[in-house]
Protein backbone atom coordinates (compact mmCIF):
# COMPACT_ATOMS: atom_id res chain seq x y z
CA UNK A 1 0.00 0.00 0.00
CA UNK A 2 1.29 3.37 -0.96
CA UNK A 3 1.45 5.65 2.02
CA UNK A 4 2.16 8.79 -0.04
CA UNK A 5 -0.85 10.94 -0.77
CA UNK A 6 -2.09 11.16 -4.28
CA UNK A 7 -0.86 14.03 -6.36
CA UNK A 8 2.53 14.31 -4.74
CA UNK A 9 5.15 14.98 -7.28
CA UNK A 10 2.72 16.35 -9.87
CA UNK A 11 0.71 13.18 -10.08
CA UNK A 12 3.69 10.92 -10.16
CA UNK A 13 2.69 7.75 -8.32
CA UNK A 14 6.19 6.59 -7.64
CA UNK A 15 6.92 5.02 -4.25
CA UNK A 16 9.34 7.86 -3.34
CA UNK A 17 9.18 11.63 -3.36
CA UNK A 18 10.64 13.48 -6.31
CA UNK A 19 14.21 14.69 -6.15
CA UNK A 20 15.35 18.20 -5.29
CA UNK A 21 14.35 20.93 -7.76
CA UNK A 22 16.49 23.73 -9.07
CA UNK A 23 15.27 27.05 -7.71
CA UNK A 24 14.66 29.94 -10.07
CA UNK A 25 17.69 32.29 -10.19
CA UNK A 26 17.29 35.29 -7.92
CA UNK A 27 19.23 38.42 -8.93
CA UNK A 28 20.82 40.24 -6.07
CA UNK A 29 20.53 44.01 -5.94
CA UNK A 30 23.81 45.75 -6.81
CA UNK A 31 25.70 47.28 -3.97
CA UNK A 32 25.54 51.06 -4.39
CA UNK A 33 28.87 52.79 -5.08
CA UNK A 34 30.04 54.94 -2.23
CA UNK A 35 31.71 58.32 -2.77
CA UNK A 36 35.50 58.52 -2.79
CA UNK A 37 36.89 58.62 0.73
CA UNK A 38 33.81 56.90 2.19
CA UNK A 39 34.72 54.62 5.10
CA UNK A 40 32.58 51.45 5.15
CA UNK A 41 33.89 50.20 8.44
CA UNK A 42 30.78 51.34 10.19
CA UNK A 43 28.42 49.55 7.76
CA UNK A 44 29.43 46.11 9.06
CA UNK A 45 26.95 44.42 11.38
CA UNK A 46 27.57 45.15 14.98
CA UNK A 47 29.36 42.32 16.71
CA UNK A 48 29.37 42.48 20.46
CA UNK A 49 31.98 39.77 20.66
CA UNK A 50 29.93 37.63 22.98
CA UNK A 51 29.47 34.87 20.41
CA UNK A 52 33.22 34.47 20.11
CA UNK A 53 34.09 35.02 23.70
CA UNK A 54 35.72 38.35 22.97
CA UNK A 55 35.19 41.29 25.26
CA UNK A 56 34.49 44.70 23.75
CA UNK A 57 37.55 46.89 23.94
CA UNK A 58 39.93 43.98 24.51
CA UNK A 59 43.14 43.83 22.44
CA UNK A 60 41.72 41.00 20.36
CA UNK A 61 38.26 42.43 19.81
CA UNK A 62 39.19 44.59 16.81
CA UNK A 63 37.47 47.69 18.29
CA UNK A 64 39.64 50.19 20.06
CA UNK A 65 42.54 47.75 20.06
CA UNK A 66 45.29 46.70 17.77
CA UNK A 67 44.29 43.05 17.29
CA UNK A 68 44.14 41.11 14.07
CA UNK A 69 40.39 40.93 13.87
CA UNK A 70 37.93 43.45 12.53
CA UNK A 71 39.38 46.86 11.75
CA UNK A 72 41.98 46.97 14.46
CA UNK A 73 45.45 47.78 13.21
CA UNK A 74 47.79 50.46 14.51
CA UNK A 75 46.12 53.06 16.66
CA UNK A 76 42.80 51.43 15.95
CA UNK A 77 42.64 52.83 12.38
CA UNK A 78 42.56 49.67 10.35
CA UNK A 79 43.80 46.18 10.10
CA UNK A 80 46.46 47.11 7.55
CA UNK A 81 47.93 50.17 9.31
CA UNK A 82 46.25 52.62 6.90
CA UNK A 83 46.04 56.31 7.98
CA UNK A 84 42.60 57.69 8.72
CA UNK A 85 40.64 59.15 5.84
CA UNK A 86 39.54 62.10 7.93
CA UNK A 87 41.40 65.11 9.41
CA UNK A 88 43.63 67.87 7.80
CA UNK A 89 46.09 66.61 5.15
CA UNK A 90 49.82 67.27 5.55
CA UNK A 91 50.99 70.52 3.79
CA UNK A 92 52.62 70.16 0.38
CA UNK A 93 55.76 72.24 0.94
CA UNK A 94 57.10 71.67 -2.56
CA UNK A 95 53.98 73.13 -4.09
CA UNK A 96 53.98 76.05 -1.67
CA UNK A 97 57.64 76.81 -2.45
CA UNK A 98 56.95 76.69 -6.18
CA UNK A 99 53.94 79.00 -5.92
CA UNK A 100 55.89 81.38 -3.66
CA UNK A 101 58.83 81.53 -6.06
CA UNK A 102 56.57 82.28 -9.02
CA UNK A 103 54.82 85.01 -7.04
CA UNK A 104 58.12 86.67 -6.11
CA UNK A 105 59.31 86.56 -9.73
CA UNK A 106 56.07 88.06 -11.01
CA UNK A 107 56.23 90.86 -8.43
CA UNK A 108 59.89 91.57 -9.23
CA UNK A 109 59.13 91.68 -12.95
CA UNK A 110 56.19 94.00 -12.35
CA UNK A 111 58.28 96.36 -10.22
CA UNK A 112 61.08 96.37 -12.81
CA UNK A 113 58.72 97.15 -15.67
CA UNK A 114 56.97 99.82 -13.62
CA UNK A 115 60.29 101.44 -12.70
CA UNK A 116 61.45 101.41 -16.31
CA UNK A 117 58.23 103.00 -17.59
CA UNK A 118 58.28 105.61 -14.81
CA UNK A 119 61.94 106.52 -15.35
CA UNK A 120 61.61 106.50 -19.14
CA UNK A 121 58.69 108.93 -18.94
CA UNK A 122 60.77 111.42 -16.93
CA UNK A 123 63.61 111.67 -19.46
CA UNK A 124 63.62 114.96 -21.36
CA UNK A 125 64.36 114.02 -24.97
CA UNK A 126 64.68 117.56 -26.28
CA UNK A 127 67.73 117.35 -28.56
CA UNK A 128 67.13 116.41 -32.21
CA UNK A 129 70.37 115.15 -33.74
CA UNK A 130 68.67 114.73 -37.13
CA UNK A 131 69.04 118.50 -37.49
CA UNK A 132 72.83 118.12 -37.49
CA UNK A 133 74.17 118.19 -41.05
CA UNK A 134 77.25 116.74 -42.79
CA UNK A 135 77.86 114.14 -40.11
CA UNK A 136 80.91 111.84 -40.01
CA UNK A 137 80.48 108.10 -40.58
CA UNK A 138 79.60 105.92 -37.61
CA UNK A 139 82.49 104.26 -35.81
CA UNK A 140 82.81 101.01 -33.87
CA UNK A 141 82.36 102.65 -30.45
CA UNK A 142 79.30 104.31 -28.89
CA UNK A 143 80.11 107.96 -28.26
CA UNK A 144 78.44 110.37 -25.84
CA UNK A 145 78.82 114.13 -25.60
CA UNK A 146 78.28 114.91 -21.90
CA UNK A 147 77.60 118.53 -21.04
CA UNK A 148 77.29 120.30 -17.72
CA UNK A 149 75.41 123.54 -18.19
CA UNK A 150 75.07 126.53 -15.88
CA UNK A 151 71.29 126.37 -16.17
CA UNK A 152 69.55 127.66 -13.08
CA UNK A 153 66.21 126.18 -14.08
CA UNK A 154 64.06 125.31 -11.08
CA UNK A 155 66.34 127.08 -8.61
CA UNK A 156 65.01 129.61 -6.11
CA UNK A 157 66.90 132.76 -5.17
CA UNK A 158 67.96 131.01 -1.97
CA UNK A 159 69.28 128.03 -3.96
CA UNK A 160 71.30 130.31 -6.24
CA UNK A 161 72.86 132.03 -3.26
CA UNK A 162 73.60 128.78 -1.45
CA UNK A 163 75.16 127.14 -4.51
CA UNK A 164 77.07 130.29 -5.59
CA UNK A 165 75.63 130.10 -9.11
CA UNK A 166 74.93 133.80 -9.62
CA UNK A 167 71.75 135.08 -11.23
CA UNK A 168 72.61 135.05 -14.94
CA UNK A 169 69.70 134.15 -17.19
CA UNK A 170 69.81 131.54 -19.93
CA UNK A 171 72.42 128.78 -19.89
CA UNK A 172 75.94 128.13 -21.09
CA UNK A 173 78.19 125.09 -21.13
CA UNK A 174 80.21 124.83 -17.95
CA UNK A 175 81.91 121.55 -18.86
CA UNK A 176 82.04 119.27 -21.93
CA UNK A 177 83.52 115.83 -22.47
CA UNK A 178 83.42 112.97 -24.94
CA UNK A 179 82.88 109.49 -23.53
CA UNK A 180 83.66 106.64 -25.93
CA UNK A 181 82.31 103.24 -24.84
CA UNK A 182 84.50 100.76 -26.73
CA UNK A 183 85.26 97.07 -26.60
CA UNK A 184 88.97 97.84 -26.37
CA UNK A 185 88.43 100.07 -23.33
CA UNK A 186 86.47 103.19 -22.47
CA UNK A 187 87.89 106.68 -22.95
CA UNK A 188 86.80 109.95 -21.38
CA UNK A 189 88.14 113.11 -23.04
CA UNK A 190 87.54 116.55 -21.53
CA UNK A 191 87.00 119.40 -23.98
CA UNK A 192 88.14 122.69 -22.41
CA UNK A 193 85.48 125.36 -22.79
CA UNK A 194 88.23 127.70 -24.00
CA UNK A 195 89.16 125.36 -26.88
CA UNK A 196 89.84 127.19 -30.15
CA UNK A 197 87.42 125.76 -32.74
CA UNK A 198 85.85 126.66 -36.07
CA UNK A 199 82.09 127.15 -36.36
CA UNK A 200 81.03 125.23 -39.50
CA UNK A 201 77.94 125.65 -41.67
CA UNK A 202 74.79 124.55 -39.83
CA UNK A 203 71.01 124.54 -39.88
CA UNK A 204 69.34 126.60 -37.17
CA UNK A 205 67.65 124.35 -34.60
CA UNK A 206 64.64 126.64 -34.33
CA UNK A 207 64.54 128.56 -37.62
CA UNK A 208 65.56 125.72 -39.92
CA UNK A 209 67.63 128.27 -41.84
CA UNK A 210 71.01 127.24 -43.24
CA UNK A 211 73.96 129.31 -42.04
CA UNK A 212 77.06 129.00 -44.28
CA UNK A 213 80.54 128.61 -42.85
CA UNK A 214 82.43 131.88 -42.39
CA UNK A 215 85.71 130.56 -41.01
CA UNK A 216 84.92 131.95 -37.56
CA UNK A 217 87.14 130.67 -34.77
CA UNK A 218 85.67 130.94 -31.29
CA UNK A 219 85.76 129.33 -27.89
CA UNK A 220 83.96 125.98 -27.91
CA UNK A 221 81.31 127.08 -25.42
CA UNK A 222 80.28 129.87 -27.84
CA UNK A 223 78.72 127.25 -30.14
CA UNK A 224 76.26 126.22 -27.46
CA UNK A 225 75.47 129.84 -26.61
CA UNK A 226 74.78 130.61 -30.27
CA UNK A 227 72.34 127.82 -31.17
CA UNK A 228 72.20 125.24 -28.39
CA UNK A 229 73.02 121.52 -28.30
CA UNK A 230 72.59 120.84 -32.02
CA UNK A 231 75.22 123.40 -33.04
CA UNK A 232 77.53 122.21 -30.25
CA UNK A 233 77.34 118.64 -31.59
CA UNK A 234 77.88 119.90 -35.14
CA UNK A 235 80.95 121.91 -34.03
CA UNK A 236 82.48 119.01 -32.08
CA UNK A 237 81.97 116.60 -34.98
CA UNK A 238 83.41 119.10 -37.49
CA UNK A 239 86.56 119.75 -35.44
CA UNK A 240 87.22 116.16 -34.35
CA UNK A 241 85.88 114.07 -37.25
CA UNK A 242 84.17 111.83 -34.67
CA UNK A 243 80.45 111.08 -34.89
CA UNK A 244 78.50 111.72 -31.67
CA UNK A 245 75.87 109.04 -31.06
CA UNK A 246 74.18 110.48 -27.96
CA UNK A 247 73.92 113.74 -26.07
CA UNK A 248 73.37 114.21 -22.32
CA UNK A 249 73.18 117.51 -20.44
CA UNK A 250 72.54 118.32 -16.80
CA UNK A 251 72.21 121.67 -15.03
CA UNK A 252 73.45 122.93 -11.68
CA UNK A 253 70.34 121.98 -9.71
CA UNK A 254 70.11 118.45 -11.10
CA UNK A 255 73.79 117.80 -10.47
CA UNK A 256 73.58 118.87 -6.82
CA UNK A 257 70.34 116.95 -6.26
CA UNK A 258 71.79 113.69 -7.60
CA UNK A 259 74.76 113.95 -5.26
CA UNK A 260 72.50 114.59 -2.26
CA UNK A 261 70.17 111.72 -3.24
CA UNK A 262 73.17 109.37 -3.23
CA UNK A 263 74.09 110.54 0.25
CA UNK A 264 77.19 112.35 -1.01
CA UNK A 265 80.18 111.26 -3.06
CA UNK A 266 83.51 110.29 -1.53
CA UNK A 267 86.53 112.09 -2.99
CA UNK A 268 90.24 112.10 -2.28
CA UNK A 269 91.44 115.69 -2.62
CA UNK A 270 95.25 115.68 -2.82
CA UNK A 271 95.74 119.38 -2.12
CA UNK A 272 93.72 121.96 -0.22
CA UNK A 273 92.23 124.85 -2.23
CA UNK A 274 89.78 127.69 -1.89
CA UNK A 275 87.78 129.71 -4.42
CA UNK A 276 85.40 132.47 -3.36
CA UNK A 277 83.60 132.58 -6.72
CA UNK A 278 82.59 128.92 -6.68
CA UNK A 279 82.33 128.69 -2.90
CA UNK A 280 84.99 125.98 -2.73
CA UNK A 281 86.89 125.57 0.54
CA UNK A 282 88.48 122.13 0.80
CA UNK A 283 91.13 120.57 2.97
CA UNK A 284 93.37 117.81 1.65
CA UNK A 285 92.33 114.21 2.27
CA UNK A 286 89.47 111.80 1.70
CA UNK A 287 86.05 113.31 2.39
CA UNK A 288 82.40 112.97 1.38
CA UNK A 289 81.05 115.90 -0.63
CA UNK A 290 77.40 116.87 -0.52
CA UNK A 291 75.61 118.49 -3.47
CA UNK A 292 76.69 122.02 -2.67
CA UNK A 293 80.32 121.05 -2.14
CA UNK A 294 80.38 118.85 -5.26
CA UNK A 295 79.13 121.68 -7.45
CA UNK A 296 81.79 123.99 -6.05
CA UNK A 297 84.45 121.35 -6.65
CA UNK A 298 83.68 120.86 -10.36
CA UNK A 299 83.20 124.59 -11.07
CA UNK A 300 86.41 125.87 -9.46
CA UNK A 301 88.89 127.26 -11.99
CA UNK A 302 90.52 130.35 -10.49
CA UNK A 303 92.18 128.43 -7.65
CA UNK A 304 94.42 126.56 -10.11
CA UNK A 305 97.40 127.76 -12.08
CA UNK A 306 96.30 125.83 -15.15
CA UNK A 307 92.82 127.29 -14.90
CA UNK A 308 90.51 125.43 -17.32
CA UNK A 309 92.74 122.39 -17.84
CA UNK A 310 93.05 121.71 -14.10
CA UNK A 311 89.33 122.18 -13.69
CA UNK A 312 88.52 119.62 -16.40
CA UNK A 313 90.70 117.08 -14.60
CA UNK A 314 88.70 117.62 -11.41
CA UNK A 315 85.45 117.30 -13.36
CA UNK A 316 86.51 113.96 -14.83
CA UNK A 317 87.64 112.70 -11.47
CA UNK A 318 84.41 113.66 -9.78
CA UNK A 319 82.06 112.36 -12.51
CA UNK A 320 83.86 109.02 -12.53
CA UNK A 321 83.47 108.79 -8.74
CA UNK A 322 79.81 109.78 -9.03
CA UNK A 323 79.17 107.07 -11.62
CA UNK A 324 81.11 104.55 -9.55
CA UNK A 325 78.83 105.16 -6.59
CA UNK A 326 75.59 105.42 -8.58
CA UNK A 327 76.14 102.21 -10.58
CA UNK A 328 76.42 99.88 -7.58
CA UNK A 329 74.05 97.18 -6.27
CA UNK A 330 73.61 99.27 -3.11
CA UNK A 331 71.99 101.98 -5.23
CA UNK A 332 70.38 100.02 -8.06
CA UNK A 333 68.79 97.36 -5.79
CA UNK A 334 67.78 99.76 -3.03
CA UNK A 335 64.47 101.46 -3.95
CA UNK A 336 64.92 104.01 -1.14
CA UNK A 337 68.09 105.21 -2.89
CA UNK A 338 67.33 104.39 -6.52
CA UNK A 339 64.04 106.28 -6.83
CA UNK A 340 65.27 109.53 -5.24
CA UNK A 341 68.41 109.39 -7.40
CA UNK A 342 66.47 108.84 -10.61
CA UNK A 343 63.85 111.40 -9.63
CA UNK A 344 66.47 114.01 -8.81
CA UNK A 345 68.49 113.54 -11.98
CA UNK A 346 66.01 112.69 -14.72
CA UNK A 347 63.91 115.81 -14.19
CA UNK A 348 66.84 118.02 -15.19
CA UNK A 349 68.65 115.61 -17.53
CA UNK A 350 68.28 116.64 -21.20
CA UNK A 351 69.12 113.97 -23.79
CA UNK A 352 68.74 113.32 -27.50
CA UNK A 353 65.55 111.82 -28.86
CA UNK A 354 67.11 108.39 -29.47
CA UNK A 355 68.57 108.00 -25.98
CA UNK A 356 67.09 105.08 -24.05
CA UNK A 357 67.50 104.10 -20.42
CA UNK A 358 69.79 101.31 -21.58
CA UNK A 359 71.99 103.86 -23.37
CA UNK A 360 72.02 105.97 -20.22
CA UNK A 361 73.00 102.96 -18.13
CA UNK A 362 75.78 102.12 -20.59
CA UNK A 363 77.08 105.67 -20.23
CA UNK A 364 77.21 105.43 -16.43
CA UNK A 365 78.87 102.02 -16.44
CA UNK A 366 81.45 103.23 -18.96
CA UNK A 367 82.24 106.17 -16.68
CA UNK A 368 82.48 103.77 -13.75
CA UNK A 369 84.96 101.57 -15.58
CA UNK A 370 87.17 104.58 -16.29
CA UNK A 371 87.24 105.31 -12.58
CA UNK A 372 88.11 101.67 -11.89
CA UNK A 373 91.16 101.82 -14.15
CA UNK A 374 89.62 99.95 -17.09
CA UNK A 375 89.99 102.80 -19.55
CA UNK A 376 91.58 106.17 -20.20
CA UNK A 377 90.82 109.59 -18.76
CA UNK A 378 92.48 112.58 -20.40
CA UNK A 379 92.21 116.16 -21.66
CA UNK A 380 92.11 116.92 -25.35
CA UNK A 381 95.77 117.23 -26.43
CA UNK A 382 96.81 120.92 -26.52
CA UNK A 383 99.66 122.37 -28.58
CA UNK A 384 99.46 126.02 -27.50
CA UNK A 385 97.15 129.02 -27.33
CA UNK A 386 95.78 131.71 -29.61
CA UNK A 387 94.33 134.92 -28.20
CA UNK A 388 93.50 133.23 -24.92
CA UNK A 389 92.01 130.17 -26.66
CA UNK A 390 93.54 126.70 -26.25
CA UNK A 391 94.69 125.24 -29.57
CA UNK A 392 94.36 121.49 -30.06
CA UNK A 393 97.28 119.38 -31.22
CA UNK A 394 96.00 118.41 -34.67
CA UNK A 395 98.26 115.41 -35.15
CA UNK A 396 97.49 113.87 -31.77
CA UNK A 397 93.79 114.66 -32.05
CA UNK A 398 93.62 112.98 -35.47
CA UNK A 399 95.38 109.85 -34.15
CA UNK A 400 93.19 109.76 -31.05
CA UNK A 401 89.97 110.00 -33.03
CA UNK A 402 91.09 107.27 -35.45
CA UNK A 403 91.80 104.91 -32.55
CA UNK A 404 88.30 105.52 -31.16
CA UNK A 405 86.61 105.13 -34.55
CA UNK A 406 88.33 101.78 -35.11
CA UNK A 407 87.81 100.57 -31.50
CA UNK A 408 91.55 100.37 -30.90
CA UNK A 409 93.33 100.76 -27.57
CA UNK A 410 94.03 104.44 -26.97
CA UNK A 411 97.74 105.15 -26.82
CA UNK A 412 97.65 108.93 -27.32
CA UNK A 413 98.36 111.06 -24.26
CA UNK A 414 97.64 114.72 -23.60
CA UNK A 415 101.15 115.44 -22.28
Image (cartoon, rainbow, N blue to C red):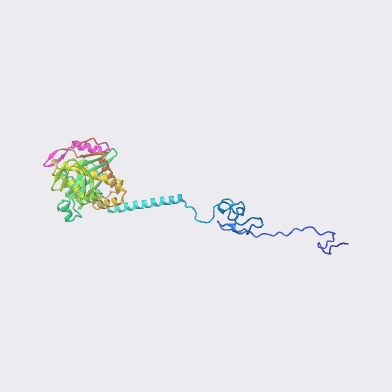
- Quarter the N terminus occupies: bottom right
Q: Quadrant of residue 58?
A: bottom right
Q: Residue at x 36, y 53 (%)?
A: 110
Residue 331, image x and y in percent? Answer: 29, 48
Residue 16, image x and y in percent? Answer: 83, 59
Residue 52, image x and y in percent? Answer: 66, 55
Q: Nearer the viewer, residue 241 or 55?
A: 55
For residue 118: magenta? no
Can residue 281 be spotted in the picture?
yes
Can residue 231 be spotted in the picture?
no
Toward the right, the furthest residue is: 1
Q: Quadrant of residue 185?
A: top left
Residue 18, image x and y in percent? Answer: 80, 59
Q: Nearer the viewer, residue 77 or 284?
A: 77
- The reply, left or right, for residue 327 in relation to residue 8 is left
Q: Which residues are magenta?
A: 384-408
- Quarter the C terminus occupies: top left
Q: Quadrant of residue 319?
A: top left
Toward the left, the furthest residue is: 387
Q: Residue at x 40, y 52 (%)?
A: 103
Q: Nearer the viewer, residue 20 or 277?
A: 20
Amino acid sequence: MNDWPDGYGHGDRRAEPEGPRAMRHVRRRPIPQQPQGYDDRYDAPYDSGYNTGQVYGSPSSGRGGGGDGGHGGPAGHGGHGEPPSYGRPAPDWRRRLKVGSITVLVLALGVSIGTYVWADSKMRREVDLTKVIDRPEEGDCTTYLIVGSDSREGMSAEDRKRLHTGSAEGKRTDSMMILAACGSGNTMISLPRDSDVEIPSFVGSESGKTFPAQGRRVKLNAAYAEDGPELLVRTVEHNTGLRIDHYAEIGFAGFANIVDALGGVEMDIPKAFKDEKSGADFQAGTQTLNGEQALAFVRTRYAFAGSDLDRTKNQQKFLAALANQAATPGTILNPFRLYPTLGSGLDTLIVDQDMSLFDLAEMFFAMKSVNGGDGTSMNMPISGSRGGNLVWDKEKVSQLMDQIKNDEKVTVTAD
